[in-house]
Image: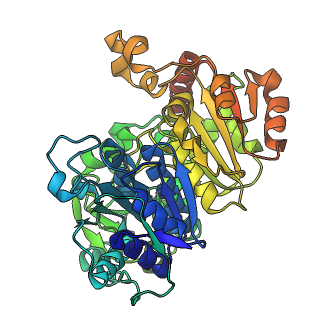
Amino acid sequence: MSTTDHISADRLIRTWVACGLTHAVVSPGSRNAPLILALSSHPSLEVVVALDERSAAHLALGMGIQSGRPALVVSTSGTAAVNHGPAIAEAFYQEVPLISVTADRPSRNRNWGLGQSAMQTGMFDAHTRWSCEVTEFQKDIHDLDEIARTAWGKSQQGPVHINISFDEPLYGQNEFVKGTGPVSEPLIFQMPETQQMPDDLQDIVCQHDPRILLHIGPVALGPSLSTEVDALIERCAVVADVFGAHGSGAESSTMRWMCGWDRQADEQWIPDAIVTVGLPPMDKRFRSLIVDWGVPHWHLGHEENDWNMFGSKVGQWRMDAKNGLNELADALPAFNGYAQRWEVRRIQLEAADMRSRNDEWVDFNVYRWLAEHLPKAGRIHFANSTSARYAQWFQWNASRLCANRGVAGIDGCLSTAVGDALMDSDTPVVAILGDAAWLYDLNGWHVNPRPNNLKIIVINNGGGNIFRWLKGPADSGLLERFFESGFATNVRGTAEQLALPYFLIDGWDSMETGFQSWANNSGSCLLEIQTPGEASANHVRNHCDTMGEWLRDS
């Protein structure tokens, strides 16, 4: 078996395999040939080839989300390397392990105007936990070993980036010799020291009938916090995003929570303190409400990102979220009047939601139907932006719900699900995307091998339906010309291009048979559900207004 004759590439890959690397994603190129040759010399590695570097990096992101371990993504030089950026930014804010390695021209040839050249050194520094430049002159195996070990350890907190220069020739090979040179143990990431509940927060928690609001946002890694959340529902006010505490009994949609909200009655809802876990809340009105309250905020967890979500952050409670929530439950009284007030409103919202529903053929009802009928899946991935918002309204039949809510862009939503499915090929995975997100990330399916356990649903409402939820685009008179990206009346052609079995639903009459054909297909396939965009947006507004009227009248 052969490997590259570039010592730097061989050494980095060799050391990462010793650290526990199992999966890598590469995109075709020439400057990265030494890295590809080095990867191919390790039969234990699962190496995926992805046509598009942007998709490739999101594949690695999905692998990291599924496993909690870094996957490696490798690109050639120039704009190919720059295309790792969106996934790196997403991994940074979700704090998902990922190692990006970008090949580069020799350092002496930079700024010569050569093809496929860009300023790659440190280009991702703002969104990485650590970065490093490896020049063509670095050949000391101990130094390279230390670089690889450091990258592996730092990647446990989020993405790292190594830019590595290669001189020509690029395709030279040597015989691979096992155990060549000492391979040290990986640099293990040391979790920051656990802190007990901050004293000033404890003072509030221990007062008579404390008013504590707990918000659980999206959490990329680890099991659902639903058990811990359910233990707190009678002890404090709780809003728990489905992407962080899927399956809990707490209110899961901040959008639904704001239906019929009466600002005149704010006083009875204002907490003494807010505790957050995970990423910020999705609904803008909910965030604005808490900002206006201006109450002290503590964030629970070991995250490196300093989330000042509401402009009133007092500090961080550095403890594992699961243990911290258990400590909070132990510190709070078993019954709390403020918590009961929030729970009563949740029950009223649930009743108002049920009373306001109808069977109109619109997005809201399609998502509700899917939540009730989807077969058990290991994980369901929802694209940004409306898909992730609809997901919060319903309970889903899955072990875990996922969405790229770090940066919350539509790029890479399919690719992330593909990476997840490839990382765990024995578990059914579902991806639910809007037509804009599907078209934007089609290259996520241009991979080899392709997963056989990923089923895809595209809700085609004419593109960019989120802009119909907002007042600005419609009021501008430019909604359909510039904001709503309705580029495909149907996605059948894309399914044919990608060799995906295709099924179509365009109304309730075809829902049952079309869904069953899709669900019973033995491999990966695509189900397109066509819905009216304008009617769907109007329905959401009307549904929330009707809920508000029912709440005010009850």
Picture residue at 79% right of the left edge, 35% below the top: 515
Name of the residue lying farthest toward the top = 477
Picture residue at 54% right of the left edge, 16% below the top: 534
270 and 157: which one is in front?
157
44 and 342: which one is in front?
44
- For residue 304, what is the image quadrant? bottom left
Q: Is residue 282 left or right of residue 41?
A: left
- Looking at the rendered image, the quarter that the N terminus falls into is bottom right
- Looking at the rendered image, the quarter that the C terminus falls into is top right
**Location of residue 155 in the rendering, given as x and y in whole percent from the top left corner:** 37, 70
**Location of residue 235 in the rendering, given as x and y in whole percent from the top left corner:** 48, 68
- For residue 457, what is the image quadrant? top right
Picture residue at 51% right of the left edge, 75% below the top: 334
**Location of residue 110 in the rendering, given as x and y in whole percent from the top left corner:** 17, 50
Picture residue at 17% right of the left edge, 52% below the top: 109
509 and 285: which one is in front?
509
